[in-house]
Amino acid sequence: MILAKPNSQEVLVVRKTLNISDRQPQQEIRILKKLRRQLQEHIPICTSFTMVTEGSDVHCLSLAAECDLRTKLGTLQHSRNGSSWNRFTACLEQFKGLVEALHFLHNTESDGENTCYCHMDIKPENIVVFETDPRDPVGRWKLIDFGISTIRDKRRFETEGGDRDRTRGQHVTYTVGTTPKSMRSRYQPPEINSQLDNSPENINMLVGRGSDVWALGCVFAEVVAANLRNLNELSRDDTRERGKPMNEFYEENRIPRWSKYKRHRSFERWLKDLKRHYNFHPGIEPCRDLIIGMTRISKIKRPSSEQVLRRLNEFFRT
């Protein structure tokens, strides 16, 4: 769809139609409206700039991007033009923007005190790339699609261990309006399967802000892999279990000890092989450490979005 104002250039937009007779579209519309009022200009979230109601349908209009991150990673994987170091640093800058977007969601009141937003469906297809400068091979990345995003109740929960800032207290985040089925994807964390196997009625207590950190950590691994041109190695899998998708980032422990799940063998192999690339760029080693932290099997041991952002800022200062 193309919109144009008098005496101005045409603007390409995307229209998403939601039927408000169902609960989930109502929730999405509610979140989009609140985010539009709360969103700060520098936060890379692409939300609807206007909504048009037509009967029971609501048409949400947003700016159209040139591609999504899945397509961009494929381009980076095969491109040999330009400086690899500069391209890698530019990708890190854009990824830092995604972390800022996540930090904004996780720390913005969504429905009163001690509530926040969680995206719950972070994946390359839900990150769009705007390419306004033909000299920029990376573009500007923005987070989209709040179809299964949730409003969370952050309740205090004391716990031992973990990578969170314990001076501020630990919290468990309760899901509102998300079903485990809608959260199934390659980038969703092991706590979803773990709870489905045991007591699916308590899924709301296990998924939360740490689940978003896991998904973004998996995306980060793919960003690094595309710049090293070994994206195929990251997703390689020598076996395929019947009824299960290939190339997940975690798998079941055959002899479970502390946890039923562990990082997938191809993912672990890729992390180990990253050491060979330390000479490629000084940022590879801290990136590897950050990916390992963000993809810990135990949700409480993953860093918060605030801690991830702090570490990335430290990287750009050095």
Image (spheres, helix red, strand yellow):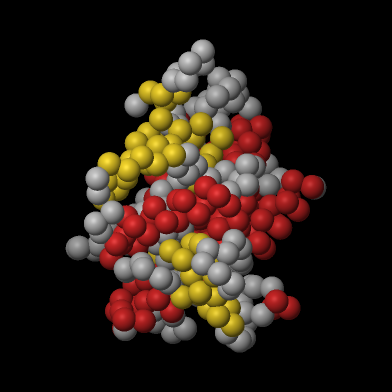
Q: Which x, y percent locates residue 148?
A: 37, 58
Q: Is residue 35 or residue 98 the one in the foreground?
A: 35
Residue 154, visible in the rendered structure: yes
Q: Which x, y percent locates residue 258?
A: 47, 83
Drawn side of residue 295 relative to residue 57, left or right:
right
Outermost residue toward the right in this view: 318
Outermost residue toward the front in this view: 55
Q: Is residue 37 above or below residue 298?
A: above
Residue drawn 25% across the image and 62% down it = 244
Drawn side of residue 222 relative to residue 60, left or right:
right
Outermost residue toward the top in this view: 7
Residue drawn 66% across the image and 56% down it = 309
What is the quadrant of residue 125 in the picture? top left
Q: Which x, y percent locates residue 166?
A: 69, 78
The quarter in which the N terminus is drawn is top left
Q: Which x, y percent locates residue 264?
A: 41, 63
What is the quadrant of residue 51 in the picture? top left
Q: Is residue 278 above or below residue 248?
A: above
Residue drawn 67% across the image and 63% down it = 307
Q: Is residue 300 or residue 132 the one in the foreground?
A: 132
Residue 268, visible in the rendered structure: no
Drawn side of residue 203 relative to residue 119, left or right:
left
Residue drawn 60% across the image and 56% down it = 104
